[in-house]
Image (cartoon, rainbow, N blue to C red):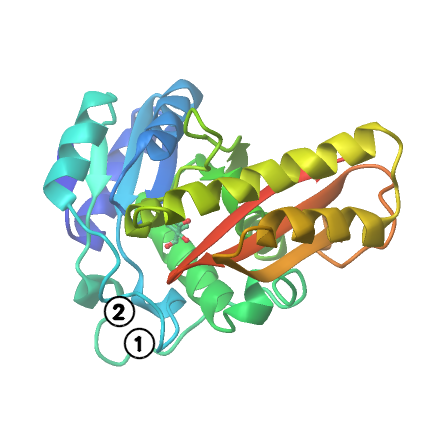
Amino acid sequence: MRIIENVGEMQRQADAWRAEGEKISFVPTMGFLHEGHLSLLRSARTLGSKSVVSIFVNPTQFGPTEDFASYPRDVGKDLELSGKTGTDAAFVPAAAEMYPDGFQTFVEVTRVTKNLCGASRPIFFRGVATVVSKLFHAVKPHVAVFGQKDFQQLVAIRRMVKDLNMDVEIVGHPIVREKDGLAMSSRNTYLLGEERLVALRLHRSLEVARELVGSGEKNGGAILQAVNDCLTAGGGAAVDYARLCDTDTIEEVEVVEGPTLLALAVWVGKTRLIDNCVLGG
Ligand code: PAF
């Protein structure tokens, strides 16, 4: 696997591949790769003839009180793991390469980012849209794969690509879970002792909602009450949000009619976890 640290070099490699008729698939990550990422990388390999992973902890998507400094990092292991998937190149830029002195241009997706994580993390989506645009300009992919665990992020990226006429296909990849149901996340490493058990309530509460909808419940209030009860029973979890939303606009809905996003963000100790499912599909 080729390791590239420089934007110009990445662009030259992408141009060379394109000139040879190769199809470039791309998985952007912030590293500390787990099985969820590796499954995106394996999927990317089937979608293109040359695949690229980026490993970059993007400072512009973290708020001043968030975990940028402590975000888990292990680039050596990331390179080893992504190399084993057969990925052709890893783009691993330094912060100064992505945001040189004088940087002042940002990409903002305005409406689908208002609710959910956008309400709790006001600069998050601006940082994500900006870095993903920059990564697309560096890697020049034909297709890019994003995990559905970050459902709102996926919707925002699709919107950005459409609105800015970016010539890249966006593919969503199903959430990858641990055997006990916990959605895989680099932040799971923060969970201490009992917190790991408390964290399982996110998946359990999605199941509770699915069961309710399966038995005919459509009332959003009743579904969210059951979800909140499941999340908070036994203590140890603080719900940031549990909401039902339209899957395209991310606006809240009161009745589950057709595919409806149930999105969760929950603090377990000092760790904020997200999870979701689509109900009524
Ligand atoms: O989902 C992530 O890991 C990040 O938000 C992304 C898309 C790599 C941008 O930094």
User: Looking at the image, can residue 166 be seen?
Assistant: no
Residue 7 placement (x, y as % from top left): 22, 53
Residue 196 placement (x, y as % from top left): 38, 43
Which label is found at residue 103? 1
Residue at figure coordinates x 21%, y 78% from the top left: 101
Which quarter of the picture shows residue 14? top left
Which quarter of the picture shows residue 243? bottom right
Residue at figure coordinates x 83%, y 49% from the top left: 222
Q: Judge the density around disc 2: few (<14), some (14-19), many (≥20) Cα neighbours within 10 Å.
A: some
Query: Given the image, on which type of amino acid does mark 1 rest?
Result: Phe
Residue 121 placement (x, y as % from top left): 50, 69
Q: Quadrant of the C terminus?
A: top right
Residue tagged by mark 2? Answer: 99
Q: Nearer the viewer, residue 141 or 265?
A: 265
Residue 146 relative to residue 71: left or right: right
Residue at figure coordinates x 62%, y 56% from the top left: 163
Q: Nearer the viewer, residue 255 or 17?
A: 255
Q: CA distance from mark 2 to mark 1?
A: 6 Å
Tell me the element at label 2.
loop
Q: Is residue 103 above or below residue 178?
A: below
User: Looking at the image, can residue 228 be seen?
Assistant: yes
Residue 177 relative to residue 49: left or right: right
Residue 249 placement (x, y as % from top left): 73, 54
| Identity of the residue furthest to the front in this view | 234
Tell me the element at label 1.
loop
Tags 2 and 1 touching, CB below 8 Å? yes
Query: Given the image, on which type of amino acid does mark 2 rest?
Result: Tyr
